[in-house]
Amino acid sequence: MANLMTRTLLLYVGFAILSVSQFIEAADQPNIVWLISEDNSHHYLKMFDEHGAETPHIEELAEHGLIYDHAFSNAPVCSVARTTLITGCYGPRIGTQYHRRSVMVPMPPGLKMFPAYLRDAGYYTANNSKKDYNAIEGKGVWDNSSKKASWRNREPNQPFFYKQSFGTTHESSLHFSSEQMEKQKTETDPEKVFVAPYHPDTETFRYTNARYRDNIKKVDQQIGQVVDQLEKDGLLEETFIFYFGDHGGVLPRGKGYAYESGLHVPLVVRVPEKFKHLVDAELGSRQEGFVSFIDFGPTALKLAGLKVPKQVDGKPFLGKGVQSSEVNQRNTVFGYADRFDEKYDLVRTWRKGRYEYIRNYQPFNVDGLQNNYRYRMLAFQEWRELYEAGKLNEAQSHFFESRGAEELYDVEADPHEVKNLANDPEHAETLKELRDELSSFVAELPDLSFYPESVLAEEAFTAPVEFGKEHQEEIALLVKVADLSLLPFENAKVAIEKALQSKDPWIRYWGLIVCSSFGKEAQEFALRASAITQQDPEPLVRIRAAEFLALISAAKPQAVFKQALKDSKSGIETGLILNSLVLLRDSEPRYEFELNREDFAKEVLKNDTVKRRLDYLLK
């Protein structure tokens, strides 16, 4: 009996010790809070840019923390950026690069969204409340994800990860009417705001700038309220607070475009007194190292003392063992821009040091191509009207004209990226270095976007990562074909001819895109392209051939497009075709197309991209 009582007592004491040790372990884990303002680049906060708005609450966070001068979203639009954040993975590698998603893809094998690892370790995870993921969330990510989510719903003394988004600065906040612009005055004086050199200096743009800066001030107050709640709850000095923007924006050429204005975000991290030993940097200092959204999840895990999964692409920039000297040596970031709603493009960026290298894989596909949601904004509408009236200078017109296959900007000397150095002999060495690094990177990733989205939806999106590995050699070959557009035409034409005769449809596809990139320089391939429009078994290859011929005014495209649209049973494929059609209709040499909804298969009309295009084309 005595032995039984002794064993029972020891068992009880053991449980008590275990319970206490778990409590101590939890107490030794910091809380982590992410406060995210939607749609704003670092240009709109004075603490990052002299022309930005005053943000005293965010500045107060910085006094007790770190300011990151080189923080980037990897993508310039919501769902792609947020999926990158929650997965720690590059979108074009895992199949989450399109906004809005046509297909929800699975997470990479063996990987969960990072809050799930925190939750498994005893954290309470709460999201208030935006998700907007392009990957399937899976189980166990959030204890609560709703507009009522709060850290206050957790168990006593339980560590927490809390994320809150603020829509005050969202693009929709600038969808005001002419009447509202006339009647609703701004706190910020429109006459005193800075207008970017790529924008026309008009009353509309000044008002839009002023209204947006007012929104930044409102977000600052909202962030201050959350911090006050943490302090009131006695949690401030045991909580890391990250403030950042979810991507750039939101004036024209911000959100949706892979320039600094679309990718460079503000980031401030407040470091709590209790856990400052996890930060190897002087509080109140500015950090020069490059960090991007792939790194944010791994950083949260590292701060919590957890292992970072091997399947992610990012690495921590804070936490035990992370040296600030090493972080400040990081000087490269990869960016990507694919489809935004109904507008297709394929742009990759490589920011290194003071330079941003932009690779436009379809340079004829102009930035200002119709995107219905973008053009709800009066500033967008006016900008296009002024361009069509011939009232813009060269920098302001660039948005509506074909781009070079490459752009290179010295961001320190030219922060608004209006002076393209790609053809400057003095920067030839830098151009080659960044070009080679980006080309190698996308081939090795591997970047799935070298296949059309419709192909990925049919063949890859059930297992994107595995598909990429299986097709890595072919993707590298497609990258090599695409990069023919970077050579002098005389050096490229033998390889172009070979590509156009390939048995692989996607090599032919890219060969034709290269022809369109060269434009009239590639006139000698017109006869071959004409034969492709009639004979190729792949509809998208026929469309790229017709597009090339139309761009150089060698043949009218209407018949080829009409037949392809009639035959298509895929909404995604139809969306790709309509993107080229809008380009040819709205840009020089401007072709007229006769379209009716009856020309499309019923299943195609259900596709969101197709709906948006037809709303525009048939209005």
Image: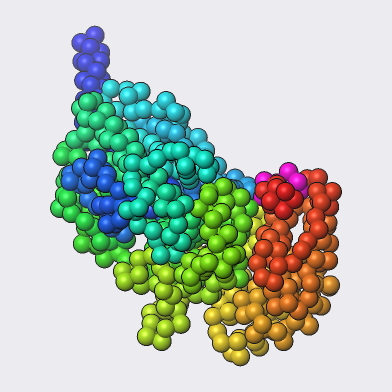
- Image location (x, y in percent) of residue 412: 31, 69
Magenta stretch in the rendered image: 604-610
What residue appears at the point 35 percent right and 52 percent down from the top-left corner?
191
Magenta stretch secondary structure, dominant: helix
What residue is drawn where x is 76% and y is 46%? 605
Q: How is this picture coloured?
A: rainbow
Foreground: 228 or 381?
A: 381
In the displayed structure, would residue 210 be above or below residue 72? above
The correct choice, above or below, for 417 with respect to 337 in the image is: below
Numbered disc total = 0
Q: In this orientation, does residue 468 appear?
A: no
> From this viewpoint, is residue 325 visible?
yes
Q: Reply above or below: 436 against 84.
A: below
614 and 396: which is toward the camera: 396
Percent position (x, y) of residue 361? Answer: 57, 70
Q: Which residue of the protein is positioned furthest toward the front in this rendering?
A: 182
Report x, y in % for residue 104: 59, 45
Q: Residue furthest top?
A: 1
Would residue 606 be counted in the magenta stretch? yes
**Would you identify the image quadrant in which residue 262 lies?**
bottom left
Which residue is at the front of the view, 57 or 162? 57
Answer with left or right where residue 105 lies relative to residue 616: left
Residue occupying the point 55% across, 62% down: 386
Residue 141 in the image, given as x and y percentages of width and height: 45, 36
| Residue at position x 46%, y 29% in the image | 146
Is the N terminus in the top left, top right, bottom left or bottom right quadrant? Answer: top left
Could you tell whether 188 is left or right of 463 in the image? Answer: left
